[in-house]
Image (cartoon, rainbow, N blue to C red):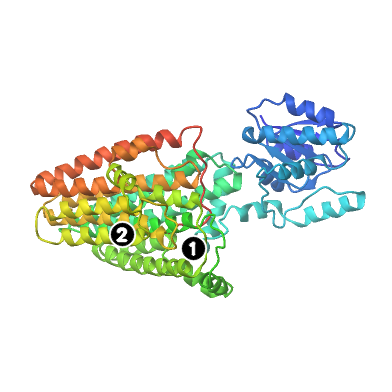
Amino acid sequence: MPTAILTGQPVPGSSIEGDLRSLGFDVRTAADTTEAETLLAAVPGDQRVAVVDARFVGHPHALRLGLTDPRFPLAAVPGAVTAQPAGRQALTRAVAREHSAGGGTTLLDNLADRVVTALDADGCAVHRPELGSLVATVPADPQARNEARQAVAAVDDEAVRLKSAVKSRDGFFTTHFISPYSRYIARWCARHGLTPNQVTTASLLTALIAAGSAATGTRAGYVVAGVLLLCSFVLDCVDGQIARYALKYSTLGAWLDATFDRAKEYAYYAGLALGAARSGDDVWALALGAMILQTCRHVVDFSFTEANHDATANTSPTAALSDKLDSVGWTVWLRRMIVLPIGERWAMIAVLTAATTPRITFYVLLVGCAFAATYTTAGRVLRSLTRKARRTDRAAQALTDLADNGPIASFVARVNPGRPDAPLLIALAGTAVLAVSLFSGFAWAPVAGAFVYAVTAGQALSRPLKGSLDWLVPPVFRAAEYCTVLILAAKAEVNGALPAAFGLVAAVAYHHYDTVYRIRGNAGAPPAWLVRAIGGHEGRTLLVTVLAAALTASQFTVALTVLAVAVALLVLVESIRFWVSAGAPAVHDEGEPA
Protein backbone atom coordinates (compact mmCIF):
# COMPACT_ATOMS: atom_id res chain seq x y z
CA MET A 1 0.00 0.00 0.00
CA PRO A 2 1.35 3.48 -0.83
CA THR A 3 2.08 5.82 2.06
CA ALA A 4 1.28 9.51 2.41
CA ILE A 5 3.20 11.52 5.00
CA LEU A 6 1.23 14.55 6.21
CA THR A 7 3.51 17.36 7.35
CA GLY A 8 1.75 18.69 10.42
CA GLN A 9 -1.72 18.28 11.85
CA PRO A 10 -4.68 18.91 9.51
CA VAL A 11 -6.71 21.98 10.40
CA PRO A 12 -10.25 21.43 11.74
CA GLY A 13 -12.69 20.56 8.99
CA SER A 14 -10.01 19.46 6.55
CA SER A 15 -10.79 16.45 4.34
CA ILE A 16 -7.18 15.78 3.37
CA GLU A 17 -6.82 12.55 5.38
CA GLY A 18 -10.05 11.10 4.00
CA ASP A 19 -9.14 12.14 0.46
CA LEU A 20 -5.76 10.45 0.69
CA ARG A 21 -7.26 7.26 2.13
CA SER A 22 -9.87 7.22 -0.65
CA LEU A 23 -6.97 7.19 -3.11
CA GLY A 24 -5.49 4.14 -1.41
CA PHE A 25 -2.83 5.79 0.75
CA ASP A 26 -1.89 4.79 4.27
CA VAL A 27 -1.76 8.19 6.01
CA ARG A 28 0.88 9.01 8.62
CA THR A 29 1.56 12.33 10.31
CA ALA A 30 4.92 13.97 10.98
CA ALA A 31 5.36 16.83 13.44
CA ASP A 32 8.73 18.02 12.10
CA THR A 33 11.27 17.29 9.40
CA THR A 34 13.11 14.79 11.58
CA GLU A 35 9.98 12.69 11.94
CA ALA A 36 9.16 13.12 8.25
CA GLU A 37 12.59 11.81 7.29
CA THR A 38 12.18 8.89 9.69
CA LEU A 39 8.75 7.98 8.32
CA LEU A 40 10.07 8.26 4.76
CA ALA A 41 12.94 5.87 5.51
CA ALA A 42 10.50 3.39 7.07
CA VAL A 43 8.42 3.04 3.89
CA PRO A 44 9.55 -0.02 1.86
CA GLY A 45 11.56 0.96 -1.19
CA ASP A 46 9.24 -0.83 -3.61
CA GLN A 47 6.21 1.27 -2.63
CA ARG A 48 4.97 4.71 -3.66
CA VAL A 49 5.35 7.46 -1.07
CA ALA A 50 3.97 10.99 -0.96
CA VAL A 51 4.72 14.05 1.14
CA VAL A 52 1.63 16.23 1.55
CA ASP A 53 1.20 19.55 3.33
CA ALA A 54 -1.49 19.11 6.01
CA ARG A 55 -2.92 22.54 5.07
CA PHE A 56 -3.67 21.40 1.52
CA VAL A 57 -7.02 22.43 0.07
CA GLY A 58 -8.15 21.10 -3.27
CA HIS A 59 -10.17 18.63 -5.26
CA PRO A 60 -9.67 14.90 -4.73
CA HIS A 61 -9.10 14.53 -8.49
CA ALA A 62 -6.27 17.06 -8.30
CA LEU A 63 -4.61 14.80 -5.73
CA ARG A 64 -5.39 11.76 -7.89
CA LEU A 65 -3.69 13.33 -10.91
CA GLY A 66 -0.70 14.43 -8.90
CA LEU A 67 -0.15 11.43 -6.66
CA THR A 68 -1.42 8.25 -8.37
CA ASP A 69 -0.43 8.38 -12.06
CA PRO A 70 1.78 5.29 -12.57
CA ARG A 71 3.62 6.65 -15.60
CA PHE A 72 5.92 9.10 -13.82
CA PRO A 73 8.63 8.37 -11.21
CA LEU A 74 8.19 11.84 -9.68
CA ALA A 75 5.08 14.02 -9.75
CA ALA A 76 3.70 16.99 -7.86
CA VAL A 77 0.85 19.43 -7.45
CA PRO A 78 0.99 22.50 -5.18
CA GLY A 79 1.32 21.20 -1.64
CA ALA A 80 2.08 17.57 -2.51
CA VAL A 81 4.86 15.53 -4.09
CA THR A 82 5.13 11.81 -4.74
CA ALA A 83 7.75 9.31 -5.80
CA GLN A 84 7.54 5.80 -7.17
CA PRO A 85 10.44 3.40 -6.52
CA ALA A 86 12.39 4.79 -9.51
CA GLY A 87 12.26 8.30 -8.01
CA ARG A 88 12.57 7.34 -4.37
CA GLN A 89 16.27 8.06 -4.01
CA ALA A 90 15.89 11.56 -5.43
CA LEU A 91 12.99 12.32 -3.08
CA THR A 92 14.91 11.03 -0.06
CA ARG A 93 17.90 13.26 -0.92
CA ALA A 94 15.67 16.30 -1.32
CA VAL A 95 13.91 15.74 2.02
CA ALA A 96 17.24 15.21 3.77
CA ARG A 97 18.56 18.46 2.30
CA GLU A 98 15.50 20.38 3.51
CA HIS A 99 15.85 18.74 6.93
CA SER A 100 19.43 19.96 7.19
CA ALA A 101 18.53 23.43 5.95
CA GLY A 102 15.67 23.79 8.43
CA GLY A 103 17.42 22.32 11.42
CA GLY A 104 14.72 19.64 11.76
CA THR A 105 12.48 21.89 13.80
CA THR A 106 9.51 22.88 11.67
CA LEU A 107 7.36 21.75 8.75
CA LEU A 108 5.18 24.83 8.54
CA ASP A 109 7.07 26.38 5.67
CA ASN A 110 5.68 24.32 2.77
CA LEU A 111 7.99 21.31 2.93
CA ALA A 112 6.38 19.56 -0.05
CA ASP A 113 6.83 22.57 -2.32
CA ARG A 114 10.38 23.13 -1.10
CA VAL A 115 11.17 19.49 -1.86
CA VAL A 116 9.85 19.96 -5.40
CA THR A 117 12.10 23.00 -5.79
CA ALA A 118 15.05 20.92 -4.61
CA LEU A 119 14.19 18.15 -7.07
CA ASP A 120 14.08 20.70 -9.89
CA ALA A 121 17.46 22.04 -8.80
CA ASP A 122 18.85 18.49 -8.99
CA GLY A 123 17.66 18.20 -12.58
CA CYS A 124 15.00 15.59 -11.79
CA ALA A 125 12.02 15.36 -14.10
CA VAL A 126 8.97 16.14 -11.94
CA HIS A 127 5.64 15.67 -13.70
CA ARG A 128 3.10 18.42 -13.06
CA PRO A 129 -0.33 17.48 -14.39
CA GLU A 130 -2.57 20.04 -16.05
CA LEU A 131 -5.22 20.83 -13.44
CA GLY A 132 -7.38 23.21 -15.45
CA SER A 133 -10.22 24.40 -13.22
CA LEU A 134 -9.30 21.99 -10.42
CA VAL A 135 -8.04 23.57 -7.19
CA ALA A 136 -4.80 22.56 -5.46
CA THR A 137 -3.31 25.08 -3.05
CA VAL A 138 -1.83 25.58 0.41
CA PRO A 139 -3.58 28.62 1.96
CA ALA A 140 -1.42 30.84 4.14
CA ASP A 141 -4.18 32.13 6.44
CA PRO A 142 -7.83 31.45 7.39
CA GLN A 143 -9.19 33.92 4.85
CA ALA A 144 -7.24 32.32 2.02
CA ARG A 145 -8.40 28.91 3.23
CA ASN A 146 -12.03 30.00 3.14
CA GLU A 147 -11.60 31.37 -0.38
CA ALA A 148 -9.94 28.15 -1.51
CA ARG A 149 -12.78 26.06 -0.09
CA GLN A 150 -15.29 28.22 -1.92
CA ALA A 151 -13.32 27.71 -5.13
CA VAL A 152 -13.39 23.94 -4.56
CA ALA A 153 -17.15 24.00 -4.03
CA ALA A 154 -17.66 26.03 -7.22
CA VAL A 155 -16.11 23.35 -9.46
CA ASP A 156 -17.65 19.90 -10.01
CA ASP A 157 -14.76 17.50 -9.41
CA GLU A 158 -16.52 14.56 -11.09
CA ALA A 159 -17.49 16.57 -14.16
CA VAL A 160 -13.87 17.63 -14.66
CA ARG A 161 -12.70 14.08 -14.14
CA LEU A 162 -15.19 12.79 -16.70
CA LYS A 163 -14.23 15.46 -19.22
CA SER A 164 -10.52 14.73 -18.81
CA ALA A 165 -11.15 11.08 -19.65
CA VAL A 166 -11.48 12.14 -23.29
CA LYS A 167 -8.36 12.86 -25.33
CA SER A 168 -7.51 16.53 -25.65
CA ARG A 169 -7.04 16.06 -29.40
CA ASP A 170 -9.19 13.70 -31.45
CA GLY A 171 -10.73 13.42 -34.88
CA PHE A 172 -14.07 14.95 -35.84
CA PHE A 173 -15.98 11.66 -35.87
CA THR A 174 -14.56 10.54 -32.53
CA THR A 175 -15.10 13.91 -30.86
CA HIS A 176 -18.69 14.45 -32.01
CA PHE A 177 -20.09 10.94 -32.51
CA ILE A 178 -18.25 8.72 -29.99
CA SER A 179 -16.86 10.64 -27.02
CA PRO A 180 -20.14 12.33 -25.96
CA TYR A 181 -21.42 8.95 -24.73
CA SER A 182 -18.36 6.70 -24.57
CA ARG A 183 -17.04 8.60 -21.53
CA TYR A 184 -20.10 7.49 -19.57
CA ILE A 185 -19.50 3.89 -20.64
CA ALA A 186 -15.93 4.30 -19.43
CA ARG A 187 -17.10 5.60 -16.04
CA TRP A 188 -19.55 2.71 -15.69
CA CYS A 189 -16.77 0.24 -16.52
CA ALA A 190 -14.39 1.84 -14.03
CA ARG A 191 -16.98 1.81 -11.26
CA HIS A 192 -17.74 -1.86 -11.90
CA GLY A 193 -14.10 -2.91 -11.76
CA LEU A 194 -13.47 -3.42 -15.48
CA THR A 195 -9.90 -2.65 -16.50
CA PRO A 196 -8.68 -0.96 -19.70
CA ASN A 197 -7.00 -4.21 -20.75
CA GLN A 198 -10.26 -6.13 -20.48
CA VAL A 199 -12.05 -3.58 -22.64
CA THR A 200 -9.15 -3.58 -25.13
CA THR A 201 -9.48 -7.35 -25.43
CA ALA A 202 -13.24 -7.04 -25.88
CA SER A 203 -12.62 -4.52 -28.67
CA LEU A 204 -10.28 -6.96 -30.41
CA LEU A 205 -12.74 -9.85 -30.10
CA THR A 206 -15.54 -7.66 -31.46
CA ALA A 207 -13.41 -6.67 -34.46
CA LEU A 208 -12.48 -10.30 -35.12
CA ILE A 209 -16.16 -11.28 -35.04
CA ALA A 210 -16.79 -8.39 -37.46
CA ALA A 211 -14.09 -9.77 -39.76
CA GLY A 212 -15.68 -13.21 -39.52
CA SER A 213 -19.07 -11.74 -40.42
CA ALA A 214 -17.56 -10.00 -43.44
CA ALA A 215 -15.95 -13.29 -44.47
CA THR A 216 -19.38 -14.88 -44.92
CA GLY A 217 -19.78 -12.91 -48.14
CA THR A 218 -23.51 -12.28 -47.56
CA ARG A 219 -25.29 -8.94 -47.39
CA ALA A 220 -26.48 -9.70 -43.86
CA GLY A 221 -22.93 -10.59 -42.91
CA TYR A 222 -21.63 -7.31 -44.33
CA VAL A 223 -24.25 -5.29 -42.42
CA VAL A 224 -23.42 -7.07 -39.16
CA ALA A 225 -19.71 -6.59 -39.86
CA GLY A 226 -20.13 -2.84 -40.31
CA VAL A 227 -22.11 -2.49 -37.08
CA LEU A 228 -19.63 -4.59 -35.11
CA LEU A 229 -16.68 -2.65 -36.49
CA LEU A 230 -18.20 0.56 -35.14
CA CYS A 231 -18.88 -1.16 -31.80
CA SER A 232 -15.25 -2.24 -31.72
CA PHE A 233 -14.16 1.35 -32.27
CA VAL A 234 -16.38 2.56 -29.42
CA LEU A 235 -14.74 0.03 -27.12
CA ASP A 236 -11.35 1.12 -28.45
CA CYS A 237 -12.14 4.65 -27.28
CA VAL A 238 -13.53 3.43 -23.97
CA ASP A 239 -10.37 1.56 -22.94
CA GLY A 240 -8.26 4.72 -23.11
CA GLN A 241 -10.95 6.73 -21.38
CA ILE A 242 -11.00 4.24 -18.50
CA ALA A 243 -7.23 4.59 -18.21
CA ARG A 244 -7.49 8.37 -18.05
CA TYR A 245 -10.57 8.40 -15.79
CA ALA A 246 -9.11 5.99 -13.23
CA LEU A 247 -5.41 6.57 -14.02
CA LYS A 248 -5.05 2.85 -14.65
CA TYR A 249 -2.12 2.98 -17.03
CA SER A 250 0.04 -0.10 -17.48
CA THR A 251 2.86 -1.31 -19.66
CA LEU A 252 0.83 -4.28 -20.84
CA GLY A 253 -2.08 -1.97 -21.62
CA ALA A 254 0.18 0.31 -23.65
CA TRP A 255 1.39 -2.63 -25.72
CA LEU A 256 -2.10 -4.03 -26.24
CA ASP A 257 -3.49 -0.66 -27.25
CA ALA A 258 -0.59 0.02 -29.61
CA THR A 259 -0.82 -3.28 -31.46
CA PHE A 260 -4.48 -4.28 -31.35
CA ASP A 261 -5.68 -1.34 -33.47
CA ARG A 262 -3.58 -2.51 -36.38
CA ALA A 263 -4.46 -6.16 -35.79
CA LYS A 264 -8.17 -5.30 -35.83
CA GLU A 265 -8.03 -3.23 -38.98
CA TYR A 266 -5.87 -5.62 -40.98
CA ALA A 267 -7.86 -8.65 -39.83
CA TYR A 268 -10.97 -6.85 -41.08
CA TYR A 269 -9.29 -6.32 -44.47
CA ALA A 270 -8.66 -10.06 -44.62
CA GLY A 271 -12.29 -10.76 -43.69
CA LEU A 272 -13.49 -8.53 -46.53
CA ALA A 273 -11.18 -10.30 -48.98
CA LEU A 274 -12.44 -13.72 -47.84
CA GLY A 275 -16.04 -12.57 -48.18
CA ALA A 276 -15.41 -11.27 -51.68
CA ALA A 277 -13.78 -14.58 -52.65
CA ARG A 278 -16.95 -16.41 -51.63
CA SER A 279 -18.78 -14.29 -54.19
CA GLY A 280 -16.18 -15.02 -56.87
CA ASP A 281 -14.35 -11.68 -56.63
CA ASP A 282 -10.63 -11.76 -55.86
CA VAL A 283 -9.70 -8.56 -54.01
CA TRP A 284 -6.69 -9.85 -52.08
CA ALA A 285 -4.39 -7.53 -54.03
CA LEU A 286 -6.56 -4.57 -53.00
CA ALA A 287 -6.60 -5.72 -49.37
CA LEU A 288 -2.82 -6.08 -49.34
CA GLY A 289 -2.43 -2.73 -51.10
CA ALA A 290 -4.62 -1.06 -48.46
CA MET A 291 -2.56 -2.57 -45.66
CA ILE A 292 0.70 -1.49 -47.32
CA LEU A 293 -0.54 2.06 -47.88
CA GLN A 294 -1.83 2.39 -44.33
CA THR A 295 1.36 1.00 -42.80
CA CYS A 296 3.55 3.26 -44.94
CA ARG A 297 1.44 6.24 -43.84
CA HIS A 298 2.16 5.35 -40.24
CA VAL A 299 5.87 4.95 -40.93
CA VAL A 300 5.90 8.45 -42.45
CA ASP A 301 4.21 9.76 -39.30
CA PHE A 302 6.57 7.92 -36.99
CA SER A 303 9.74 8.85 -38.89
CA PHE A 304 8.87 12.53 -39.10
CA THR A 305 7.95 12.64 -35.42
CA GLU A 306 11.13 10.90 -34.29
CA ALA A 307 13.29 13.01 -36.59
CA ASN A 308 11.95 16.18 -34.95
CA HIS A 309 11.42 14.81 -31.45
CA ASP A 310 14.16 16.93 -29.90
CA ALA A 311 15.49 18.91 -32.83
CA THR A 312 16.69 22.44 -32.05
CA ALA A 313 15.65 25.59 -33.95
CA ASN A 314 12.66 23.53 -35.03
CA THR A 315 10.52 26.21 -36.67
CA SER A 316 9.46 26.99 -40.23
CA PRO A 317 7.13 29.35 -42.12
CA THR A 318 5.04 26.32 -43.09
CA ALA A 319 4.56 25.37 -39.45
CA ALA A 320 3.63 28.96 -38.62
CA LEU A 321 1.02 28.95 -41.39
CA SER A 322 -0.36 25.66 -40.07
CA ASP A 323 -0.66 27.14 -36.57
CA LYS A 324 -2.41 30.18 -38.00
CA LEU A 325 -4.93 27.98 -39.82
CA ASP A 326 -5.59 26.10 -36.60
CA SER A 327 -6.72 29.38 -35.05
CA VAL A 328 -9.68 29.37 -37.44
CA GLY A 329 -12.19 26.91 -35.96
CA TRP A 330 -13.57 25.19 -39.05
CA THR A 331 -10.16 24.61 -40.62
CA VAL A 332 -9.06 22.55 -37.61
CA TRP A 333 -11.78 19.96 -38.15
CA LEU A 334 -11.39 20.01 -41.94
CA ARG A 335 -7.66 19.33 -41.70
CA ARG A 336 -8.20 16.58 -39.14
CA MET A 337 -10.80 14.91 -41.35
CA ILE A 338 -8.91 14.96 -44.65
CA VAL A 339 -6.02 13.01 -43.15
CA LEU A 340 -8.56 10.20 -42.61
CA PRO A 341 -7.69 9.30 -39.00
CA ILE A 342 -8.84 6.05 -37.47
CA GLY A 343 -12.30 7.28 -36.47
CA GLU A 344 -13.22 8.64 -39.90
CA ARG A 345 -11.57 5.70 -41.64
CA TRP A 346 -13.33 3.01 -39.64
CA ALA A 347 -16.68 4.79 -39.98
CA MET A 348 -16.20 4.97 -43.74
CA ILE A 349 -15.20 1.29 -43.95
CA ALA A 350 -18.18 0.24 -41.81
CA VAL A 351 -20.72 2.17 -43.90
CA LEU A 352 -19.24 1.03 -47.21
CA THR A 353 -19.14 -2.58 -46.04
CA ALA A 354 -22.81 -2.53 -45.11
CA ALA A 355 -23.97 -0.65 -48.20
CA THR A 356 -21.67 -1.74 -51.05
CA THR A 357 -19.18 -4.49 -51.92
CA PRO A 358 -15.67 -5.27 -50.66
CA ARG A 359 -14.20 -4.14 -53.98
CA ILE A 360 -15.85 -0.72 -53.76
CA THR A 361 -14.86 -0.48 -50.10
CA PHE A 362 -11.21 -1.06 -50.94
CA TYR A 363 -11.28 1.31 -53.92
CA VAL A 364 -12.64 4.16 -51.80
CA LEU A 365 -10.26 3.30 -48.95
CA LEU A 366 -7.23 3.31 -51.26
CA VAL A 367 -8.20 6.62 -52.87
CA GLY A 368 -8.91 8.24 -49.49
CA CYS A 369 -5.71 7.00 -47.88
CA ALA A 370 -3.64 7.93 -50.94
CA PHE A 371 -4.98 11.49 -50.81
CA ALA A 372 -4.40 11.71 -47.06
CA ALA A 373 -0.88 10.33 -47.43
CA THR A 374 -0.07 12.82 -50.19
CA TYR A 375 -1.44 15.74 -48.15
CA THR A 376 0.41 14.90 -44.93
CA THR A 377 3.67 13.89 -46.59
CA ALA A 378 3.77 17.00 -48.78
CA GLY A 379 3.18 19.20 -45.76
CA ARG A 380 5.96 17.53 -43.82
CA VAL A 381 8.36 17.76 -46.73
CA LEU A 382 7.65 21.50 -46.96
CA ARG A 383 8.22 21.90 -43.23
CA SER A 384 11.48 19.99 -43.44
CA LEU A 385 12.76 22.08 -46.35
CA THR A 386 11.84 25.44 -44.80
CA ARG A 387 12.89 24.88 -41.19
CA LYS A 388 16.45 25.18 -39.96
CA ALA A 389 16.31 22.32 -37.49
CA ARG A 390 19.47 20.61 -36.28
CA ARG A 391 18.83 16.91 -35.84
CA THR A 392 20.24 15.28 -32.71
CA ASP A 393 22.17 12.04 -32.42
CA ARG A 394 19.15 10.49 -30.71
CA ALA A 395 16.91 11.35 -33.66
CA ALA A 396 19.43 10.02 -36.17
CA GLN A 397 19.71 6.77 -34.22
CA ALA A 398 15.92 6.44 -34.11
CA LEU A 399 15.77 6.79 -37.90
CA THR A 400 18.52 4.20 -38.27
CA ASP A 401 16.57 1.79 -36.07
CA LEU A 402 13.36 2.45 -38.03
CA ALA A 403 15.21 1.68 -41.27
CA ASP A 404 15.51 -1.97 -40.12
CA ASN A 405 18.72 -2.74 -42.02
CA GLY A 406 19.74 -6.41 -41.80
CA PRO A 407 23.10 -8.19 -42.04
CA ILE A 408 23.73 -7.44 -45.73
CA ALA A 409 23.08 -3.71 -45.54
CA SER A 410 24.88 -3.44 -42.21
CA PHE A 411 27.98 -5.08 -43.71
CA VAL A 412 27.92 -2.67 -46.67
CA ALA A 413 27.54 0.29 -44.29
CA ARG A 414 30.61 -0.80 -42.33
CA VAL A 415 32.91 -1.36 -45.30
CA ASN A 416 31.58 1.42 -47.56
CA PRO A 417 34.48 3.83 -48.15
CA GLY A 418 32.46 6.57 -49.83
CA ARG A 419 30.26 7.74 -46.96
CA PRO A 420 27.76 9.43 -49.33
CA ASP A 421 26.07 12.70 -48.38
CA ALA A 422 22.66 11.99 -49.93
CA PRO A 423 21.11 8.99 -48.13
CA LEU A 424 17.59 9.62 -49.43
CA LEU A 425 18.71 9.87 -53.06
CA ILE A 426 20.69 6.64 -52.72
CA ALA A 427 17.71 4.88 -51.13
CA LEU A 428 15.43 6.14 -53.92
CA ALA A 429 17.92 5.05 -56.57
CA GLY A 430 18.12 1.53 -55.17
CA THR A 431 14.34 1.35 -54.89
CA ALA A 432 13.96 2.54 -58.51
CA VAL A 433 16.32 -0.19 -59.73
CA LEU A 434 14.33 -2.76 -57.78
CA ALA A 435 11.03 -1.47 -59.20
CA VAL A 436 12.29 -1.61 -62.79
CA SER A 437 13.61 -5.13 -62.31
CA LEU A 438 10.24 -6.34 -60.99
CA PHE A 439 8.55 -5.36 -64.26
CA SER A 440 11.40 -6.27 -66.61
CA GLY A 441 9.93 -9.62 -67.68
CA PHE A 442 13.13 -11.57 -66.91
CA ALA A 443 12.80 -14.22 -64.21
CA TRP A 444 16.07 -13.47 -62.40
CA ALA A 445 16.09 -9.70 -62.97
CA PRO A 446 14.30 -9.02 -59.64
CA VAL A 447 17.09 -10.89 -57.85
CA ALA A 448 19.69 -8.58 -59.37
CA GLY A 449 17.51 -5.59 -58.56
CA ALA A 450 17.10 -6.75 -54.97
CA PHE A 451 20.86 -7.17 -54.65
CA VAL A 452 21.42 -3.59 -55.85
CA TYR A 453 18.70 -2.48 -53.43
CA ALA A 454 20.45 -4.25 -50.53
CA VAL A 455 23.78 -2.59 -51.35
CA THR A 456 22.26 0.87 -51.67
CA ALA A 457 20.39 0.34 -48.39
CA GLY A 458 23.74 -0.14 -46.69
CA GLN A 459 25.24 2.89 -48.43
CA ALA A 460 22.28 5.05 -47.40
CA LEU A 461 22.92 4.27 -43.74
CA SER A 462 26.69 4.47 -43.81
CA ARG A 463 26.45 7.83 -42.04
CA PRO A 464 23.90 9.34 -39.61
CA LEU A 465 20.54 10.36 -41.08
CA LYS A 466 20.68 14.06 -40.21
CA GLY A 467 19.64 15.63 -43.49
CA SER A 468 16.44 17.64 -43.76
CA LEU A 469 14.62 14.88 -45.68
CA ASP A 470 16.44 11.83 -44.36
CA TRP A 471 13.35 10.90 -42.29
CA LEU A 472 11.89 9.65 -45.59
CA VAL A 473 14.46 6.83 -45.81
CA PRO A 474 12.56 4.36 -43.54
CA PRO A 475 9.23 4.89 -45.40
CA VAL A 476 11.00 4.31 -48.73
CA PHE A 477 12.38 1.02 -47.44
CA ARG A 478 8.96 -0.04 -46.11
CA ALA A 479 7.28 0.69 -49.44
CA ALA A 480 10.01 -1.12 -51.39
CA GLU A 481 9.84 -4.30 -49.31
CA TYR A 482 6.07 -4.52 -49.02
CA CYS A 483 5.42 -3.71 -52.69
CA THR A 484 7.98 -6.29 -53.80
CA VAL A 485 6.04 -8.99 -51.97
CA LEU A 486 2.75 -7.73 -53.42
CA ILE A 487 4.00 -7.58 -57.01
CA LEU A 488 5.70 -10.98 -57.00
CA ALA A 489 2.68 -12.63 -55.37
CA ALA A 490 0.35 -11.05 -57.92
CA LYS A 491 2.59 -12.20 -60.79
CA ALA A 492 2.47 -15.79 -59.48
CA GLU A 493 -1.21 -15.93 -60.54
CA VAL A 494 -2.09 -18.92 -58.37
CA ASN A 495 -4.66 -19.29 -55.61
CA GLY A 496 -3.17 -18.60 -52.22
CA ALA A 497 -0.20 -16.50 -53.30
CA LEU A 498 -1.73 -13.15 -52.37
CA PRO A 499 -3.20 -14.36 -49.05
CA ALA A 500 0.25 -15.73 -48.19
CA ALA A 501 1.80 -12.40 -49.14
CA PHE A 502 -0.81 -10.66 -46.96
CA GLY A 503 0.27 -12.79 -44.02
CA LEU A 504 3.97 -12.10 -44.61
CA VAL A 505 3.52 -8.33 -44.88
CA ALA A 506 1.31 -8.36 -41.77
CA ALA A 507 4.01 -10.18 -39.77
CA VAL A 508 6.75 -7.82 -40.96
CA ALA A 509 4.54 -4.77 -40.37
CA TYR A 510 3.97 -5.93 -36.79
CA HIS A 511 7.74 -6.03 -36.34
CA HIS A 512 8.00 -2.46 -37.61
CA TYR A 513 5.20 -1.20 -35.34
CA ASP A 514 6.88 -2.96 -32.42
CA THR A 515 10.11 -1.13 -33.25
CA VAL A 516 8.31 2.20 -33.23
CA TYR A 517 6.78 1.75 -29.79
CA ARG A 518 10.03 0.55 -28.28
CA ILE A 519 11.72 3.70 -29.57
CA ARG A 520 8.89 5.88 -28.28
CA GLY A 521 9.40 4.35 -24.85
CA ASN A 522 13.14 5.10 -25.00
CA ALA A 523 13.81 1.36 -24.90
CA GLY A 524 15.77 1.30 -28.17
CA ALA A 525 15.29 -0.96 -31.15
CA PRO A 526 14.49 -4.68 -30.95
CA PRO A 527 17.52 -6.86 -30.15
CA ALA A 528 20.10 -7.22 -32.92
CA TRP A 529 19.69 -11.01 -32.97
CA LEU A 530 16.04 -10.63 -33.95
CA VAL A 531 16.80 -8.22 -36.81
CA ARG A 532 19.51 -10.59 -38.05
CA ALA A 533 17.27 -13.64 -37.69
CA ILE A 534 14.49 -12.18 -39.83
CA GLY A 535 16.97 -10.74 -42.32
CA GLY A 536 16.29 -7.02 -42.19
CA HIS A 537 14.23 -5.37 -44.91
CA GLU A 538 16.86 -5.89 -47.61
CA GLY A 539 17.48 -9.55 -46.67
CA ARG A 540 13.77 -10.40 -46.79
CA THR A 541 13.38 -8.57 -50.10
CA LEU A 542 16.30 -10.45 -51.63
CA LEU A 543 15.03 -13.78 -50.28
CA VAL A 544 11.54 -13.27 -51.71
CA THR A 545 12.92 -12.43 -55.15
CA VAL A 546 15.13 -15.54 -55.08
CA LEU A 547 12.18 -17.71 -54.08
CA ALA A 548 10.04 -16.24 -56.86
CA ALA A 549 12.74 -16.88 -59.47
CA ALA A 550 13.79 -20.36 -58.32
CA LEU A 551 10.42 -21.95 -57.50
CA THR A 552 7.23 -22.68 -59.36
CA ALA A 553 4.21 -20.53 -58.60
CA SER A 554 2.73 -23.16 -56.28
CA GLN A 555 6.03 -23.71 -54.51
CA PHE A 556 6.47 -19.96 -54.16
CA THR A 557 3.10 -19.74 -52.42
CA VAL A 558 4.12 -22.42 -49.95
CA ALA A 559 7.46 -20.68 -49.36
CA LEU A 560 5.74 -17.35 -48.67
CA THR A 561 3.45 -19.08 -46.18
CA VAL A 562 6.35 -20.72 -44.37
CA LEU A 563 8.28 -17.45 -44.31
CA ALA A 564 5.23 -15.59 -42.94
CA VAL A 565 4.79 -18.12 -40.15
CA ALA A 566 8.49 -18.08 -39.25
CA VAL A 567 8.70 -14.29 -39.11
CA ALA A 568 5.44 -14.04 -37.15
CA LEU A 569 6.59 -16.57 -34.55
CA LEU A 570 9.96 -14.90 -34.02
CA VAL A 571 8.68 -11.34 -33.73
CA LEU A 572 5.65 -12.23 -31.62
CA VAL A 573 7.58 -14.32 -29.11
CA GLU A 574 10.24 -11.63 -28.66
CA SER A 575 7.66 -8.83 -28.59
CA ILE A 576 5.51 -10.53 -25.95
CA ARG A 577 8.60 -11.33 -23.88
CA PHE A 578 9.66 -7.69 -23.97
CA TRP A 579 6.32 -6.00 -23.37
CA VAL A 580 5.37 -8.13 -20.36
CA SER A 581 8.81 -7.71 -18.79
CA ALA A 582 9.41 -5.34 -15.91
CA GLY A 583 11.63 -3.09 -18.00
CA ALA A 584 9.10 -2.36 -20.75
CA PRO A 585 8.04 1.28 -21.11
CA ALA A 586 4.49 2.56 -20.71
CA VAL A 587 3.70 4.21 -24.05
CA HIS A 588 0.38 6.00 -24.44
CA ASP A 589 -0.64 8.05 -27.44
CA GLU A 590 -2.76 11.07 -26.61
CA GLY A 591 -3.31 12.05 -30.23
CA GLU A 592 -5.43 10.07 -32.66
CA PRO A 593 -3.16 8.05 -34.97
CA ALA A 594 -3.78 7.92 -38.70
- Side of 508 where 139 appears, left or right: right
Q: What residue type is labelled 1?
A: Gly
- The residue under label 2 is 426
Given this view, does label 1 or label 2 mark the residue nearer the observer? 2
- Mark 1 to mark 2 CA distance (whole Å): 37 Å
For marks 1 and 2 on the same chain, the one whose residue lies earlier in the sequence:
1
Crowd tier of the residue under label 2, counting other residues whose Cα lies within 10 Å: few below 14, some 14–19, many 20 or above: many
Crowd tier of the residue under label 1, counting other residues whose Cα lies within 10 Å: few below 14, some 14–19, many 20 or above: many
Q: Quadrant of the C terminus?
A: bottom left
Front-lying residue, 258 or 35:
35
User: Residue 198: in sight, yes or no?
Assistant: yes
The residue located at (66%, 41%) in the rendering is: 74
Residue 171 got which mark?
A: 1
Front-lying residue, 198 or 326:
326
Q: Provide residue 335's location: percent of width, then percent of height.
A: 47, 70
Q: Which amino acid does label 2 sit on?
A: Ile
Q: In which quarter of the image is the N terminus?
A: top right
Q: Is mark 2 on a helix, strand or loop?
A: helix
Q: Provide residue 133's location: percent of width, then percent of height.
A: 72, 57
Quadrant in which residue 99 is drawn:
top right
User: Residue 281: in sight, yes or no?
Assistant: no
| Residue placed furthest toward the front | 417
